[in-house]
Amino acid sequence: MNREEIYDWVERARDKCVSDSLEAEDFDELLKLAGNSNGIARQRLLYLHSSSPSIRSGLIGHALHEPVKGSTTQIDPLVPELPYHCVHDAILDGWRVIHFPQQLAPFEDREIDIIGYEFILEKIEVCDV
């Protein structure tokens, strides 16, 4: 979605309202600009596992859960290409952190059965259905 194009559309629509020339096709154009003509907004989930609880710490694993029926996701810490270098990079790309790793409880390394410190992020995007 290009915000600048949408803002431009709104300005043109305001002018058309004043001149009483706004038409149904104008709204079709807006839907096309918003990318919402044939899809609905759905939540994507990204699990990022870092080497420390810092959002700038390097990643050691990830799992992307897509809002697609029948999709499966496996966490593979050995995959050489991670989507980002750190959680902060994902935030800059529009992902929102919805869960931070627990840091209050004491633990011993042998008790940990997860890969690093788990951050869960979400992004709401339009998906074709």
Image: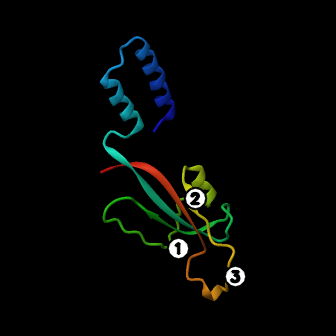
The residue wearing badge 2 is 97
Q: Is residue 62 left or right of residue 74?
A: right
Residue located at (33% from left, 30% from top)? 28
Label 3: element kind: loop
Classify 10 Å Cα crowding around label 2: few (below 14), some (14-19), many (20 and above).
many
Q: In this view, does 26 lie to the left or right of 93?
A: left
What amino acid does circle 2 point to? Val
Residue type at mark 3 is Pro
Label 3, residues with CA under 10 Å away: few <14, some 14-19, many ≥20: few
Q: Of marks 2 and 3, which one's residue comes earlier in the chain?
A: 2
Determine contact: label 2, label 1, CB under 8 Å. no
Q: First in sequence: mark 3 or mark 1? A: 1
Locate residue 106 relative to residue 25 in the image: left or right: right
Q: How far from the left and from the top, in percent, is residue 104? A: 69, 75
Q: Name the residue under label 3.
A: 106
Callout 1 secondary element? loop
2 or 1: tag closer to the N-terminus: 1
Camera-side mark, 3 or 1: 3
User: Which amino acid does the dot numbered 1 rest on?
Assistant: Pro
Between 89 and 44, the one lying in front of the other is: 44
**How much space separates mark 3 and mark 1, taking CA atoms?**
24 Å
Number of labelled discs? 3
- Which of the two discs, 2 and 1, sits closer to the camera? 2
Mark 2 and mark 3: span between their CA atoms? Answer: 23 Å
**Residue 17 location in percent, x, y?**
41, 17
Residue 103 percent location from the top left of the image: 68, 73
| Residue 114 lies in quadrant | bottom right
In the image, which disc is placed on residue 77? 1
Which residue is at 56% across, 83% downward? 113
Marks 2/1: CA distance?
Answer: 20 Å
Check whether the beta carbons of the residues at disc 2 and disc 3 lie within 8 A of each other.
no
